[in-house]
């Protein structure tokens, strides 16, 4: 009985690692897209709009871009991990 629960525990641990890795990869991809999607209008507005030129220094521009990238990473990673866990929990329920 000890080996069965150990095997089951190892299987669940491997599944959790796979789910978290999928979340990291999906989050990184979303962060890259969000970086480009927020950097282009931020840099363009600083060059074209006088208000933005005077009030958005380089630190503010970096904060805008990094905030968008960070938010995208965590939102997508969380959704991916939860979707994978939900899919695996349903699969385990039908096997039992």
Image (cartoon, grey):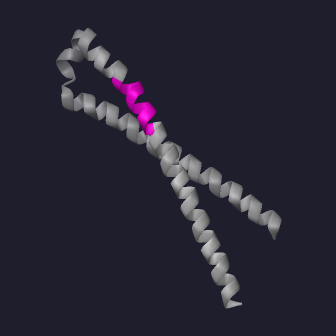
Asked if residue 29 lies left or right of residue 94, the reply is left
**Foreground pick, 80 / 25:** 25
Asked if residue 75 lies left or right of residue 84, the reply is left
Q: Which quadrant of the figure has residue 63? A: top left
Q: What residue is shown at x 24% (from left), y 13% (from top)? A: 47
Task: Return the x and y of residue 67 as percentages of the image width and height.
Answer: 35, 37
Residue lying furthest bottom in this view?
Answer: 1
From the viewer's perspective, is residue 22 above or below residue 45?
Answer: below
Q: Quadrant of the C terminus?
A: bottom right
Task: Return the x and y of residue 38 as percentages of the image width and height.
Answer: 38, 26
Asked if residue 82 lies left or right of residue 72, the reply is right
How many dots with numbers?
0
Tell me, yes or no, whether the highlighted magenta stretch contains residue 32.
yes
Q: What residue is shown at x 23% (from left), y 30% (from top)? A: 60
Q: What residue range appears in magenta?
A: 31-39
Q: Which quadrant of the figure has residue 15? A: bottom right
From the viewer's perspective, is residue 44 above or below residue 95?
Answer: above
**Foreground pick, 20 / 65:** 20
Q: Which quadrant of the figure has residue 19? A: bottom right
Tell me, yes or no, whether the highlighted magenta stretch contains residue 36.
yes
Task: Return the x and y of residue 46 as percentages of the image width and height.
Answer: 25, 16
Asked if residue 82 lies left or right of residue 34, the reply is right
Q: Main secondary structure of the magenta part?
A: helix
Q: Quadrant of the N terminus?
A: bottom right
**Foreground pick, 55 / 34:** 34
**Foreground pick, 59 / 24:** 24
Q: What residue is shown at x 76% (from left), y 60% (from top)? A: 91
Q: What residue is shown at x 67% (from left), y 77% (from top)? A: 8
């Amino acid at each position: 009985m000890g080996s069965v629960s150990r095997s089951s525990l190892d299987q669940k641990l491997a599944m959790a690692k796979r789910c978290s890795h999928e979340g990291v990869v999906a989050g990184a991809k979303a962060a890259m897209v969000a970086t480009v999607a927020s950097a282009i209008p931020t840099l363009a507005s600083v060059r074209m709009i006088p208000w933005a030129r005077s009030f958005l220094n380089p630190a503010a521009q970096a904060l805008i871009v990094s905030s968008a990238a960070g938010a995208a990473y965590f939102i997508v990673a969380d959704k991916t991990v939860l979707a994978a866990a939900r899919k695996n929990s349903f699969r385990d329920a039908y096997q039992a």
